[in-house]
Amino acid sequence: MEETVSRHFIERIIDSDIETGKNGGNVITRFPPEPNGYLHIGHAKSINLNFGLARQYNGTCHLRFDDTNPVKEDMEYINSIMEDIRWLGFDWGKHLYFASSYFEQMYAWAIQMIETGKAYVDDLSVEEIRSMRGTLTEPGKESPYRNRSVEENLDLFRRMKEGEFPNGAKVLRAKIDMASPNLNMRDPIMYRILHAEHPKTGNRWCIYPMYDWAHGLEDSIEGITHSICTLEFEDHRPLYDWFIDQLPGVHHPQQIEFARLNIDCTVMSKRKLLQLVTEKYVSGWDDPRMPTVSGLRRRGFTPEAIKDFCDKIGVSKVDSTVHYSFLEFCLRTDLNKRAQRRMAVIRPLKLTVVNYPEDRVEWMEAENNPENASAGTRLIPFSRDLYIEQDDFRTEAPNKKYFRLAPGKEIRLKHAYYIKCESYKTDADGNVTEVLCTYDPASKGGWTEDGRVVKGTAHWVSARHAVKAEVRLYDRLFNAEEPGRQTGNFLDDLNPNSLEILTEAWVEPSLAEAAPEENFQFLRLGYFTADKKDHTKNAPVFNRSVSLKESFTKEVLNHRN
């Protein structure tokens, strides 16, 4: 395959392997999530990379659940992960695997490690092992149990498996080098005792393999050729290779690390995301403010926008942070092409066209998407009583550059007529309650024979025909570029204005037929989607997916400087 300047370093590695005939020219990747939470946008990058490479090289990508910790795992997470991957447009076919399916083989290999003097049972607690591990400048201390005989270690390990000991009483450790400059090589733990029911294996096991022991073996069993993981596992690669090298004759995959995805104004630690959910700072894992795939989906992100984002940020070996605004840009670009245009008034102000017949209704033709002629047109009802946005009217025009509605000012109603404000009404507190206008019958469609042009245009809905809706205005969950950087507590940087719910919005009648997850551009307001969970025909709910342009100001990002 011919190399181009745009090819990233993993593609170049695979190109070289194919050229030299390594792995028989096969490319087998995997996406190995832990089923202890919902997938987030960082996982989407890994999914896009692993499944994308397999597709690019006519290979295979496995979906493998690394279910080695039953305490934190749940079938809810397994089901959500599979749903998210399919929604993103990828399919593992028959290649669905679980680490728990390999527990017997891993146990047999652990016995083999003990028999060759490469592993031993340790009675030290995890805290004691950690305290004796040493530092980057000082070697660790050997456990007093390190030199047990093979026979004693085999007996103790079998008894661990049979459930004879309580949690934390013993562990199985690899015997490598307590003076290694790589702390991961200082006799790492391979198995711990954990009396807990497993979602797949029930109570069959009470010892569970640690990630560093299990992961490379899972890759080996499945014949993975390129085991692609994020950069924090680079220091674990010598251990990945060491474990496989101790088992003669097994397949040895190549581990390759790339930089993980970091986005400003966002947290992607599973621990922090779980805290947001459990402490009810958000409504759930699929809250539209969350960076989870399900949250982004509910907010109105499309698979195409997420994949385009992942492709555009690229793959590298250097950690960096991507601005959230770029993720929004990718969504705008996609929705601009596909989202049909509609009119909605989310903060309504009554407008009466006083010289328009009370019983008359006209149906105005409007394009569904000016970026896509094939989207066709629709008809919008126009009548005497309308709603416009409160922001589109002022009792006095502030300056000559003000092109919205004010007494004596003329504007154009989108797809309809020119109107001129004659007067307005207020309540006892001075709040404007109604705007009274006249219309020019010769201006239908937004032009007149005399050729006059008005600069201001407003969107509107017919009060008699509009459908009442709830509109949820979402913004970023955090108002700091690096949540928690200044105080140490990421919760201190929660954006108190990340959600505004408007229950008095009015939308044009065609939106009554909107399907859940259908995307629209509300003219002049932004891109919105019918909520995946709460939207119904009788009670429409629309989420703002993204504004029409970047609106998260420097004043809101008050920690940037």
Image (spheres, grey):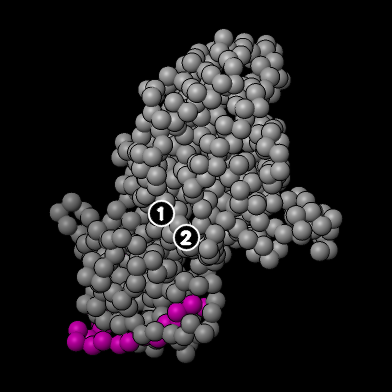
Residue at far left of view: 428
Question: Which quadrant would the C terminus be assigned to in this image?
Answer: top right
The residue at the point 31 percent across, 60 percent down is: 533
Q: Residue at x 44, y 63 (%)?
A: 527
Q: Amino acid at mark 2?
A: Phe
For the magenta stretch, what is the residue range?
A: 346-370
- Residue 460, above or below 362: above
Q: Position of residue 111 (x, y in %)?
A: 57, 31
* Relative depth, front residue between 233 and 383: 233
Q: Which residue is mark 1?
A: 80
Query: Could you tell me which residue is drawn at 53 percent across and 63 percent down?
Result: 94
Kindly identify which numbered label has been placed on residue 301: 2
Whether residue 462 is situated above or below residue 138 in the rendered picture: below
Tags 2 and 1 touching, CB below 8 Å: no
- Image coordinates of residue 84 in percent, x first then y, are 46, 57
**Residue nearer the viewer, 47 or 494:** 47
- Residue 95 part of the magenta-drawn span: no
Q: Which residue lies most toward the front here?
A: 151
Picture quadrant of residue 79: bottom left
User: Dot 1, how many residues are within 10 Å of its Cα: few (below 14), some (14-19), or many (20+)?
Assistant: some
